[in-house]
Image (spheres, grey):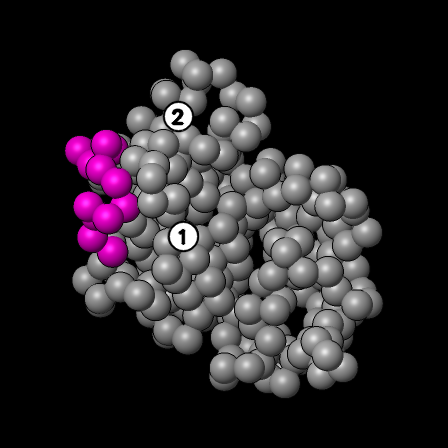
Amino acid sequence: MAASSTLSPEPRVLTVSGVHKSYAQRPVLGGVSLTVDAGERVALMGPSGSGKTTLLNCLGGVDRPDNGSIQLMGQKIEHLSSDELAGVRRARIGTIFQFFHLLPTLTAFENVELPLQLLGVAAADRHKRVSALLDRVGISNREQALPAQMSGGEMQRVAIARALVHRPNLVLADEPTGNLDSRNGAIVLDLLRELSDETGTAIVLVTHSQEAAAICHRALHLRDGLITEPNLNVG
């Protein structure tokens, strides 16, 4: 089912203005501008090489744009120091990857707990929040399992819990169902939609999948580093 287009009146989470990025003098982003509001889910779509992942990396502070501005909750992040940027990522951003990127020596519980440890959250509060979120994503019975002992669908649910446990303003998801079968992909998409609605967390989701785009309020299509179809309502 496509997402409802009705959004609550919350602060703007993300404002991107004229972002350019090149690698080895090869232009990848040619002046991208977009906005994302609290609780809004936006799909980034387009062919391979169009700049989707590069844009996601810039939004998350992994890469710095050559020109342009990225504001997260009103704070410009493109000129922050490395330490300041790391602090913003820890507190305000969650990330979900296609290949899960769980730490192999940590249990499901410990993987989800890690962002809270980095923020200095007290142990009792960490335990309460991690337990509640693992239950919410339906894998509380697997909290002591290591990644190698879990299925792909279970690992991605752990990754979703890890991305949301510190209550970020923005979640960046890079092909979150790309390594899952259709059944587990549908489960993960339903969880992302439901948890975003419940928490008011904005999501920017890179995908080639129409099913993934359907949980979003709108889709932005990139081609050759430019948005060619802005604000396409997928609802």
In the image, is residue 3 above or below residue 202?
Answer: below
The quadrant holding residue 169 is top right
**In the figure, is residue 211 to the left or right of 27?**
left
Q: Quadrant of the N terminus?
A: bottom left
Q: At 61% from the left edge and 61% from the top edge, which residue is drawn? A: 57
Residue 204 visible in the picture: yes
Q: Nearer the viewer, residue 193 or 29?
A: 29
Residue at 26% in and 40% down = 146
For the residues labelled 2 and 1, the Cα–Cα distance comes to: 21 Å
Is residue 142 covered in magenta? yes
> Which percent across, then down, holds residue 38?
58, 47
Label located before the other in sequence (2 or 1) = 1
What residue is pinned by disc 2? 129
Q: Is residue 146 above or below residue 61?
A: above
Give how far across and how far down residue 156 sits, in percent. 32, 51
Answer few, some or many: residues within 10 Å of disc 1's Cα (few below 14, many 20 plus, some between 14 and 19): some
Residue marked by disc 1 = 101
Q: Which residue sits at x=17%, y=33%? A: 141
Q: In this picture, which residue range is highlighted in magenta?
A: 141-152
Is 35 on the left or on the right of 6, as rendered?
right
User: Foreground residue, 75 or 60?
Assistant: 60
The foreground one among 105 and 117 is 105
Q: Report the disc number at residue 153.
A: none
Observer-nearest residue: 18 or 107?
107
| Quadrant of res 51 | bottom right
| Residue ID at (76%, 81%) | 25
